[in-house]
Image (cartoon, grey):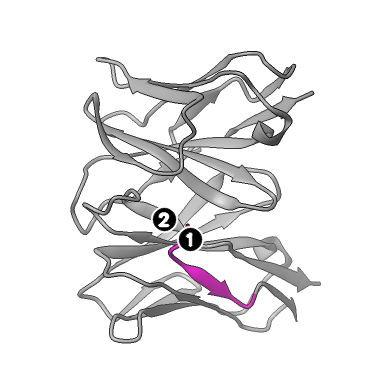
Amino acid sequence: SQQGEEDPQALSIQEGENATMNCSYKTSINNLQWYRQNSGRGLVHLILIRSNEREKHSGRLRVTLDTSKKSSSLLITASRAADTASYFCATGNYGGSQGNLIFGKGTKLSVKP
Amino acid sequence: DSGVTQTPKHLITATGQRVTLRCSPRSGDLSVYWYQQSLDQGLQFLIQYYNGEERAKGNILERFSAQQFPDLHSELNLSSLELGDSALYFCASSVGYGDMNTEAFFGQGTRLTVV
């Protein structure tokens, strides 16, 4: 079963705009990771935020984590056409019976030039 | 390039057959994970090994098995293949297991088509 659920399922924006994707999860976690996947290709690791962190930045990416609400958001600022991809959150929950990195179904981002 | 190598990249086989997918983790990584990605199921966790031992099991069918060898590469064996097994199979690796800093890096995947 899925742990994370991304929202929205699909997002279409113009180049230069900001894109925000949300992820909700169900159980306690050790960390939460965001990945990007271009169509049919491998997953690229974007950022990891630990359960004791609230916000993290990497270049044009900003991730927040609210463990009380069991939710995270990924903000991509000043989006580019090259950001077009699917974005997944994955929760790290070590010791769980379902394994320790569980993915949501992803948000498909389309950035129009 | 993530440093995780998967072979083959593409595989076409008939129903009822058996195939082996291979994964070489990043240098220094002890954990290997296998995932299946199909259109209707998303990314499903199959199994994880750490330093040769099975550590976690997900939605892996009994027809599927895996192992991690002493040199840390891993193989995923899929047998009695069905049409529904057609999917992208990903391997990922990470340095550790069970800590807050474990980033997992993915290979490019093996696209399996069962005809």
Please give the range of residues in magenta.
A1-8
- Sequence-wise, the earlier of marks 1 and 2 is 1
Q: Position of residue B14 (x, y in %)?
A: 75, 16
Q: Position of residue A43 (x, y in %)?
A: 54, 48
The CA distance from mark 1 to mark 2 is 7 Å
Viewer can see residue B41: yes
Q: In this rendering, would B71 be left or right of B105?
A: left
> What's the residue at 29%, 64% (across, down)?
A31
Classify mark 1: residues with Cα within 10 Å, few (<14), some (14-19) or many (20+).
some
User: Does residue A62 sit above or below B84 in this rendering?
Assistant: below
Viewer can see residue B108: no
Q: Is residue A6 magenta?
A: yes
- Disc 1 marks which amino acid? Gln
**Secondary structure found at label 1:** loop
Task: Give the number of marks.
Answer: 2
Q: Position of residue B93 (x, y in %)?
A: 36, 37
Question: For mark 1, what is the residue?
Answer: A2
Classify mark 2: residues with Cα within 10 Å, few (<14), some (14-19) or many (20+).
many
Q: Is residue B79 magenta?
A: no
Q: Position of residue B94 (x, y in %)?
A: 31, 41
User: Does residue A78 sit above or below B42 in this rendering?
Assistant: below
Name the quadrant of the C terminus of chain A.
bottom right
Question: For mark 2, what is the residue?
Answer: A102
> What's the residue at 18%, 54% (across, down)?
B99
Secondary structure that dominates the magenta span: loop
* Front residue of B45 and B73: B45
Q: Are marks 1 and 2 in contact (CB under 8 Å)?
A: yes
User: Does residue A76 sit above or below B55 in this rendering?
Assistant: below
> What's the residue at 37%, 29% (across, down)?
B25
